[in-house]
Amino acid sequence: MFSQKTLWGSLIALVLLTGTSGITLVEIPAHSSEQSSQFQRIEQPLGLKVGVAIAGLALIGLELWWFLLYKSPDS
């Protein structure tokens, strides 16, 4: 499909485009008083967090069943 030369060229171009200076770390304030007033933390109830997690896992399970385990009736 791709030649080895094309693959290596694409990999080198990707490294050069992303930069080789390393990762820049951002310091996150430890106290809420140091944070900017642009965003405010909203504490969610534990039941809501659990419900969303269970619903997400159920949807992932449904997709896995549909694409990997479901047998169509006409086959």
Image: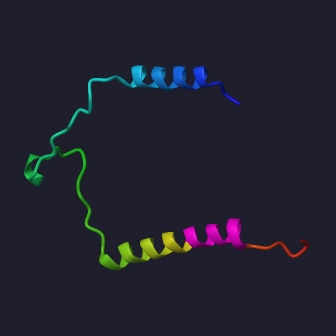
Up the image or down, 37 lies above or below 72; here it is: above
Residue 70 as seen in the image, left or right of residue 16: right
Q: Residue furthest bottom?
A: 47
Magenta stretch holds residue 60:
yes
Image spot of residue 36 (x, y percent): 16, 43
Magenta stretch holds residue 46:
no
Q: Residue furthest right?
A: 74
Image spot of residue 62 (x, y percent): 62, 72
Up the image or down, 51 lies above or below 31; here it is: below
Give the main secondary structure, helix, strand or loop, of the magenta stretch: helix
Residue 46 as seen in the image, left or right of residue 59: left
Q: Quadrant of residue 48?
A: bottom left
Give the magenta part as a residue range. 59-69
Q: Quadrant of the N terminus?
A: top right
Picture residue at 46% right of the left edge, 76% below the top:
54
Residue 35 as seen in the image, left or right of residue 69: left
Image spot of residue 26 (x, y percent): 20, 38
Up the image or down, 53 lies above or below 22; here it is: below
Picture residue at 23% right of the left edge, 54% below the top:
40
Q: Quadrant of residue 2?
A: top right
